[in-house]
Image: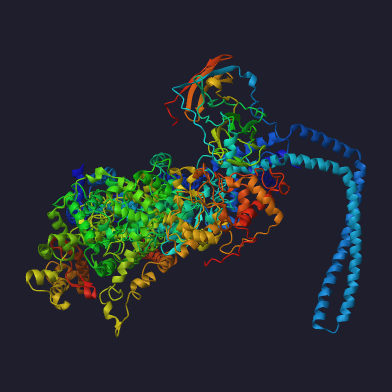
Amino acid sequence: MPKRLVFVCSSILVLALAAACGGGGNDTSGLPPAPAGGAPGGATFDMATATGTVSGKIAFEGTPPPAARIQMSADPYCAMSATPETSVSEEVKVSDGGLENVIVYVKTAPAGLTFATPAAPIVIDQKGCHYSPHVFTMMVRQPLEVRNSDMTLHNIHVWAETNTPVNIGQAVQGMKNNINLDKEEVPLPIRCDVHRWMNSFAGVFSHPFHTVSGAGGAYSLKLPPGTYEIVAWHEKYGMKTQMVTVAGSETKDLGFSFSAAAAAD
Amino acid sequence: MEFIKDFINFLSDPKILIVLASALLFVSLRYPHKFYTDRAAAIVFSGMALFLVLSMFDADFRLIVSKPDNVPIVGMLFLVPFFTWFSMREAVRNDKRLADGKPLTEQEETAEKVLTWPDLVYTELICMVVLTVVLIGWSLLLPAPIEEPANPSASPNPSKAPWYFLGLQEMLVYFDPWLAGVVFPSLIIVGLMAIPYIDTNPKGNGYYTLKERKWEISVFLFGFLVLWILLVILGTFLRGPNWSFFGPYEYWDLHKLEALVNVNLSEYIWVKALGMGLPGNPLIREIFGFIAILAYFLAIPAVLAKTSFKRFYNTLGAARYHTMVFLLLAMASLPIKMVLRWLFNLKYIVGIPEYFFNI
Amino acid sequence: MPNLKDRLREGLEFLSPSNVGKYIQESQIYRSIFRVGVPDSDRKRMLVMLGSVFLHLHPVKVRKSGIRMRYTWCMGGITFFLFLVLTFTGLLLMFYYRPTLEYAYVDIIDLREQVPLGIMREIHRWGAHAMVISVWLHMYRVFMTGSYKPPREFNWNVGVILLVLTLLLSFTGYLLPWDQLAIWAITVGSGMARATPFLGHEGPGAALLTLGDIPLVSNTSDARFALLGGRFVGEAALLRFYVLHCVGLPLVAGFLMAIHFWRIRRDGGISGPV
Amino acid sequence: MSSESPNGGHKPPIPTPAKKIPALNIEKRGDRLYQIDHLHKWFAISSLLLFVFTVGMILADYSRDWKRYQREFNRLSVANTQQDMNQAASAIDRARFDQLQQQLQQAQAGQVQNEAQIEGIQDQIADLQADFFAVNQNYQFEKAIYDAEKYEYEEALALKASNVEQLGTQLRETEQGMNEYKAEVDKLTIEIRNVTAELNKFVGQRAVIQTEVDGMLGDYQRLQLRMNALNPGAVVTSIRNAPVLDMLAPSERVNQILLPNLFYEHPFKLVPRVDRCTTCHLGIDQPAFENAPQPFKTHPQMDLYLAASSAHPVEQFGCTSCHSGLDRAVDFQTAGHMPRTPEQRTEWEEKYGWHEEHYLETPMFAMNNIEAGCYKCHNASADVPNAPSLNTGRDLIRIYGCFGCHRIPGYENVRKVGPDLSTVSGKLSKDWVRKWLANPKAFKPEARMPQFWGNSNNSGTENATPSGWDKRNAAEINAITEYLFSKSRSQTLPQGRNGGSAERGKQLVESVGCYGCHAIGPIQEAERQSQTRRKHGYNLASQGSKVTANWIFNWVKDPQQVWPGTKMPSLRLTDAEAADVTAYLTSLKNTEFDSQALPQADAAALDEITVEILRAGSTDIEARQTLATMTPEQKTLFAGERLVGRYGCFGCHTIPGFENAQPIGTELTVAGSKLISQFDFGFLNIEHSRSGWYEAKLKDPRIFDVGRVKRPEELLKMPNFRFSEDEVNSIAMVLTSLVKDPVPLEMRDRTTAAISEGRLLVAEKNCKGCHLIEGAGGDIRATMDQAMWPPNLATQGAKTQPMWLHTFVKDPSTTRLRPWLTTRMPTFHFTEQESATIGRYFSALDNVDYPFITTDIATNNEKLQAAGQLFTTLQCAKCHPTSTGPPPPGVSAEDLAPNLMIAHERLRPEWVLNWLVDPQKIMPGTRMPTFFPDGPDRPSPLTNFLGANVRSQIEAIRDHMFITLSGGRRRPAPVTSTND
């Protein structure tokens, strides 16, 4: 009897052993480990650190084409309320050899930076069947307000490709509308379908490094140190780009030149 | 290289291949001690192995030979000659021993008895294990063929019967299906079954010998080796689309056309010899054919009985003699028809397609 | 009370291999199965041969010349062994193969693709080719050693029938994968039956077998139609060949093999010089 | 071992008996066949070999490629789950979690204090439950008896048995007893509920916190469970997948989808499909594997394919129904993958040892050819959604007229593509025709006429006949030209006005709408919306050197007069306009082609051709005799007629004498299922597949004659269209898409008949050349100013009234919508049936009712009155003229919008409401502004009208248009029924 007993219990022992090691695997409950990984996303960019400046003159060679008179007979109100500078096409405005209304901007902002969207709205006024300002730049999601200060019907037709197209009619004087543009797009033509001659151009950017050349073609950009590709765009004479590197708090002079001969391609 | 290939292609033409093989067989049976020696075997088999390995470099050869279903036939190409050589070598040795009066190799051990267990059973076990190993190895190496799903409306060119019936399919080139497909195969079976009853030679029972059974062995070898095994190998490797001949190194091109214009015996005689039109009634038209066939199966046995087969006639007796000669003539009719086809493009000796009766 | 230590020693000693071996061999179960036990004496070696249903195929003692590999080439044994392998693998394949037009081909594809141990199909097919070759070589050896001579003529005939059955087994098996190779090989093969004299509708003499002007032998009532169960190789042919291949022919072959083995023994065992 | 026998002579000696050796050591005995250890050695060796081979066999059978892929996929999904877990863990608010833990401890501590009370309550509950059980059981018994008696009672009632009352009283008694028990049971349940409520007061607090903690950890724990399922530990996985054990519960197994009603077409038998592709493509239907490496990548456009809610749920369609390939295969090679580009092919050859799967009749479509899989179900409508190159292929077949010679499904009754040659003498000159036939592309590169002569098998020296190919081709061309001119009917066209200005003609051609179907010269890449729409009409380059001015004038004026049944619509040009256009078109010359030397006809070559033709029908001798009797004209006409028959010119052109000749090309109805073994690849080393052959054939149709000895009449006849590379790919794709796989009706694409018929008609009339329909088309837009664009027909069905649409489409000149536009909607001479199809098509697209609609408008005076003021404040009249006169001074035509006077009979009332709310949503890019940018629900910017309610303001404007502007009728006339 004992012999058989020993035999039986040893085999059971072996089986038990085999089953035991079979189990294992990690348990389900218990506290989740402390999460790894750094802070969520980069911090917002502080304009004060943009110590470098790039400025210069958009020169214009050749004789500027004569500013064409706008024929406003189609709408008596426009003809009546036109003023000398509104009744002349602002397509090519040259003052002491410098080309105005040129959008100058940095092609790509330094990586990893996020920028606060300015709260101040950009205002376009339709006065005397004329958009003012003619060319302007703004940031993505910056509020854009369009006012109709004429006693006639205007419609703001934003010919956007990447943004959603907008086409709002403003029949009554004093009407105000806000347009939301949430994607970067340069150039963004805005026209009035009722008065063909009315048009303006916007530059929507996801970074703050952009401006429009003013009187005498002067412009200036405040940039943090680094190398940038600066682009100058004009509605008739097209686009020119140059590379520039800005050190600490240095002001770099960067001139562009457009010639009357080279018609915009 | 090209020249060798063309030469082998030329050699492997059925006309030459079959004649050469038969001649080789009969000469080797005539001088067995010269052909069936160890040295001869070493030369022949190493030669064949070398031929196979070298030819593997030719794409067309490899394409046909490496087809999974053809590999066993390449195996048979080595096995059958080996066993022929082996049995002949044993026969040659036994014949020499008989000549010197020494006991046969089999006789030395025939008296002694051994226990089946363990000897026979153990060797059989080992043999079975070895065979299983070979089978598994072979299956691991070669995947079984599976082609497109069966499509009764799209017949591949060439459509071949299973490889062991290719001998019969090769006979179809020379005979009508009723002969090549039904009559001859049954004659082969009947012939095989009749062997013990028409072979009354007591000698050679239970041991390898050639001298004592020269006649039976040479007839059997000619039938088995040349008319069966060789035709199977020929049918597998050398017959391509439209069942036309392709050398081992030729590409199986569908468009290959061979000038196959065969003439009936009746056309030869009536039109070519006598210059007349073919008579309408088939019986009259084929009268020459009938005469030839009857003469072949009736006159020849009688003549042989009187002349060279006189010894047979006396030893076998009428019944055995006539069955043997009939079977012999039937077997001989294939090589004869082949020769007639090669030399005279003869199609049918008797050609009555209206009743499907063509010989 | 024997203390623990020696009870343990006793147990270990009980577990020693020889002891266990003896223990098993003496058990009633073992003895009921193996009457003779380990054949370590001539007497037992003979009894084990007589006692076993499989081994009693062989005589108890056998002539030395008869079992020389040089003499018999062992071809008969190989053929029989291959027949057993084919039966075994064939049975396994029957689990997965369905002989209908719808499933035949895809089942063979399944065997190749995902059926575990699908290699059985390869073993079955190459075994079949090997069996055909070994049958021919066996006939060849029997002829070359003149072993068909009396008293073994009848056994030779049984052998010839077995040869034919092997070819038919392989022929019917060839059709089952139902691919182009199969259907056209069988179409060519069965095409011969069409030309059987008198029984084939394209054979000589078929026109004679008419009842008045009604032809008895036509393409829907001749030997080929009987073989294929239709005018062309279709589902009927596949089923018919399947039944022949799995049941009909193997049974007849098995039956004849029994006779064949029996006659070997009765006609004086493996042939040898008298 | 063998003993020699002394006596010679013939009789075999009798060997001496074996020596007697004791039985024991069997090994040493003489009477043995082999030495036993010799046998043991061989037995050992062979058994070892057998063991090795058997194990090898099992391992070979076990180690399959797809298992490697499944292990790889498991690693990938474990990594993914780990990533999700980390995310879930970081998402948990750490502080809140710790705080809850503390509260949990407190609750537990509280519970410990009043342990005793809790226990007491728990005992109480236990007792109550025991009583409840007992009482409940009695109640159940009583209820069972009651039910049984109720049955008997009802039975008795029904059969009006005698013991009805007795059973009734019995029933009521048991019912009464049952209710008593029920009351007791209810009492006890209430008691238990109160006591547990009390217990909760102590325990409940803890349970609430616990549930909140679980809520926070919910995601994390769910992922943890998934992780355990995926990765139960190496030991467990290896045991589950061990060679023999893997029949129990393997984690690596073959996945398959049994397709209920999609079959394979084996000859004469439908074989059920079992797709096993997901055995390796494991991540195919899991969105998490978008950018996993192949084979685990997720299927693109999951919303369209595979997802249960998509149009092709995977358990209904599987994979091979679209991708083809061997469904049951679980191996890369046997499945029949086909490489997309030669580079991929070499890569696969190295990586997987890929080679063409020889015996597979249905290899997979290469990925650039995958759209071919769509056609077999989507064969009802003209264009297959999401299959741009397949649709281009089908359009190309319609443009190049392949159906002229080949029977192709979907083109059964399409009109012949070439111009009608029965009046060719009035249109063209013989010399021009000869030069044109010799090499059409020399005249204009965009010529659609294919090249019959000078191809790879009938030029140069190959298979050259004695007179040489050049002379021979010239003779054939001359014969055909002569034949055509001899059979041509004379057509006298009225003398048109000439002296038009080419300058104005050019403007007209560019603005009136010709560029919708035609182009002059090559089309710039930028202007190209699609490869085919501006090729619908012939290219008009160098038209001047082709036809006479008078012919152009009459053709442009009214094409139906010149060629009744032509597809060209009439643009209702005035005589002046027609003259201008003619002037412009005649100015387009191809001087280089004009100055080309005429191919010289050679008498010997003509004889040669004529004899060849005669020889076919009779013996050589008779052929020569008849040749001798024929005059050169007879020879030319005879040869010309037979050659037209041989080359099948009647396939594309109507030729007198061949009105009902049968097309000569091979049938292509099931070109996609033709057995690969039936293709003759000749001696070319192209990919042995259907697309390989078709692409080679399309590139150079005569390529398969290369290297073959052939007589001229046996040469391949298909002309060379000089297709571009992607044209070849698109057409070859269409051919491989024509498979004969059986698709049951319920699996077919179920677009309604109205829409598919409409799409066919739109494709045939090339409406998309000008209009934007279903988001596609508008090819003409690239050639003109934005103001002149033909309208975008989105929501056309919901927009227009069926009656107006029907009459407008039949004759566009009847409605003065925008009279000042130069671009005109041409008159297509639609039949009643066709214009009804158009109406039904557009309304089916927007599923609005057709053809009977109500246009009544319920309105009131106050609204109408406000509408007037609204209409003026919004100054609608500034763009929308309300009179039919010319545009007001100073306003150029481009600025004007459709005339509102006819709005009431043209537009559907409800559509106007949606339109005014937000026009951009319906037609993005339209110049109509929205006056209510904040949408219909918020107050309108125009505060002093109708309470600044946008909806009523819009309705007011609509009422104004429909009622006031349309001549003051209070309610528009009841709808006139259209005779559809």
Considering every residue shown, the one lying at the far left of the view is B274
Q: What percent of the width, then of the height, locates residue C222?
A: 33, 74
Q: Quick check: D869 left or right of A210?
A: right
Q: Is D382 left, or right, of B325 in this rendering?
A: right
Q: At 64% from the left edge and 24% from the top edge, which residue is drawn?
A: A45
Q: Quadrant of residue B241?
A: bottom left
**Nearer to us in this view, D85 or D312:** D312
In this view, which residue lies farthest toward the bottom? C212
Depth check, front residue: D274 or C39: D274
The total of numbered circles placed on residues is 0
- Specify the color scheme: rainbow
Q: Is residue B66 visible?
A: no
Q: Nearer the viewer, residue D203 or D620?
A: D620
Q: Is residue D834 left or right of residue B245?
A: right
Residue A208: percent from left, percent from top = 60, 26
- Percent x, y of residue C104: 45, 61
Quick check: D384 left or right of A250? left
> What quarter of the picture does the N terminus of chain C occupy?
top right
Q: Nearer the viewer, residue D80 or B135?
A: D80
**Camera sees residue D613:** yes
Q: Quadrant of the C terminus of chain C?
A: bottom left
Q: Residue D949, relative to residue B302: is it above or below?
A: above
Residue D899 is situated, as x and y percent measured from the top left of the image, at 55, 51
Q: Residue at x 38, y 69 (%)?
A: C228
